[in-house]
Amino acid sequence: MAQVNKTDKKFIIPILALVISSIILVATINTYIDIKNFKTNVKQDIKHYKEEYLEKNKQEIYKRVHFINDSIDFQLRRLESKAHKTLQERITIALNVADFIYTQLKGKMPNKEIKNRIIKHLASIKFNNGMDYYFVYNSKTNIMLGHILKQYIGKDMTNETDIKGTNIISLYNNALKNKKIAFVKNYFYKPNDTKQEYEKIVAVAKFEPLDLVIGTGEYIDDIEAQVKSTILDRFAELPKNKTNYVFIYKVNNINGGENFATMILNQNRPDLVGGQISDYYKDYKGKLFIKEFLDGLRKNGEAYTTYWYQKPHTKEIKPKMSYFYYVKKWNWFIGSGFYFDDLDKVVQEKKKHLEKYTSKLIKNTLKITIFTSLVIIFIAVLVALKIDNTIESYLQRLALKSKKLKTLNQSLEDQVELKTKQNIKQLEVLQQQSKLASMGEMIGAIAHQWRQPLNAIATSIQNLKYDFKEGKLNDETYIQNFITTNKQTIKFMSKTIDDFRSFFRIDKEKKEFKVKETTQAVINMQMAQLSDHNIEIQISGDEFEYKGLQSEYQQVILNLISNAKDVLVEKGIKEPAIEVVIKDNTITISDNGGGIPKEILSRIFEPYFTTKEQGKGTGMGLYMSKMIIEENMNGALQVHNGPKGAVFTIILN
């Protein structure tokens, strides 16, 4: 027992201290890491949700505002169409009246008197509370014969222009050259306002028997007034308990100021309608948000702005985002906004979840630490008691082994010669394994060669979604082209692995193939990718046949064109181009990418040498291409810089 107590004193205390401190340290680190990772994930979730929430609601208020703007355009088109029909009916009535009077009085009195009768009758007809009327002028002399504004009666209108510089009579006469009833737009005074000209839609028609042109019109601002009334009435109502609403300002001064605008619509605050708006107004955080969105409207015609504002039907001040659109033709600002209430709720819920998770994790970690410590302490005591016996036994065995050392040394000398032979054999095995590993890495480079065909297939499949929306999938030719193109690419990719596997075989079969046709086939497979980057590729030269490995030749061409494409895209070359020229037994592939830096020109055919970012290139493409051309096809692959960029030359012997 005395020996046991000594052992306890010597080994148990440091072992227990080490074990317990290690457990506590590991548990603390793991808990810290878990909490940190969880916090990071929660922050990422909150950030992602905020981005989605913001984008979704921005789109909703954008659509809401532009729905009103679209409604304005629709109503204007509808009322203008209605005005055309109304004016056509008025002109038809005027022509019928003129024809009736002319028929009844023809031959019974002079034409001049008949004209006066017609003009007098039309002058008595008014529309729209006297704002719309008939006018009549002589088509030969352009003399105004009848008009609601007396100062124009008897006036030669030949040179009369409106505020836009349009010659009014020329406008009417030109419109009537090929039409019985013509519609035009010009500016003219109103019966109750002869100081300002207003745009109007005018319908004119000829009454040939008396060389008359009869016209009538409607002022566009009267049509717009109807649309404005319709829009304001339509959007004035909103279901209760809604925080998403629209509001409209009538702009008095686009540059801002004390009373730069008047509120003409507010779905949730009708009490504000008619009130003046100042750009000096601040939100509850002191932000001049009106100045902010005014600046955006002046520059871009639209603007988003964030500010703190009182929620409708509550006394709460909440953050809000609004979108404003400038309807320039009416000097209206249409706006809509949303509050960040839902976002705040989700953020708070996630923070509470984080606090609960942290508290639970710490408690669980503490329980596990205590339990683990008790178990390890018990084991540590047993281990400490075992250590003393182990050391004692070890010392005894060490003395015994020392005696046998001389005998073992002699035995080892005898075995040296045998070991040497075994090492030589093992070295041969390692060399063979190294060779196999090199072959495996070569085959692994297939992934690099497959990237572009795979991207082409992925892009083609991705485009199905958009082509489906455009109805292209119903086109039999489109489907056939899609299937054919991707089958060719997949077939080529499938064959690539066989070509690489046969690379190291001695019995690879060579056959005659057409070089230009084979080169063109490779270009065709890459045409979609090249077109995506606006890269123009041309092939020229004469056809010739060559006996060799066609698939490996295709692989070389594919790699050289792909490298040229990557350089052009990476450097952002304007009007990028690749040229392939076949002459005699030589194929040159050149680009306008600026060339290869002189300091690396001599190294580009080295294995694993690449200038691309990590993960974007293996450095095996050009190395393999050179091996294929020079070792498998007894040719040569060379490179130099031309006037515009790199020039790769393949010589087939």
Image: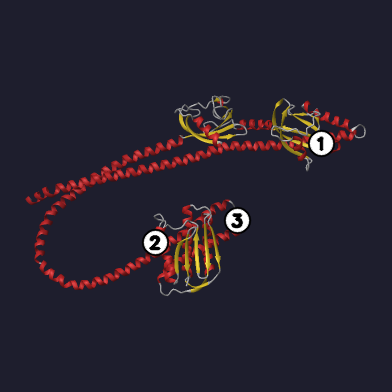
Q: CA distance from mark 3 to mark 1?
A: 57 Å
Q: Residue at x 57, y 34 (%)?
A: 326
331 sits left or right of 306 in the view: right
Q: Residue at x 51, y 30 (%)?
A: 291
Which residue bears the numbered disc 1? 139
Identity of the residue drawn at 60% across and 56% down:
474
In this view, the mark in front (2 or 3): 2
Q: In terms of depth relative to the viewer, which is nearer, 541 or 82?
A: 541
Q: Is residue 98 toward the left or the right of residue 293 in the image?
A: right
Residue assigned mark 2: 603
Image coords of residue 552 (percent x, y)? 46, 68
Q: Of all residues shown, which one is farthest toward the right?
A: 108
Please name the amino acid that badge 2 sits on. Arg
Residue 221 placement, left or right of 438: right
Which residue is label 3 attached to?
474
Q: Is residue 29 left or right of residue 323?
A: left
Work out whether residue 399 can be spotted: yes
613 up-or-down from 271: above or below: below
Residue at the spot x=44%, y=40% of the render? 50
First along the sequence among labels 1 and 2: 1
Q: Check disc 2 and report its element: helix, strand or loop.
A: loop
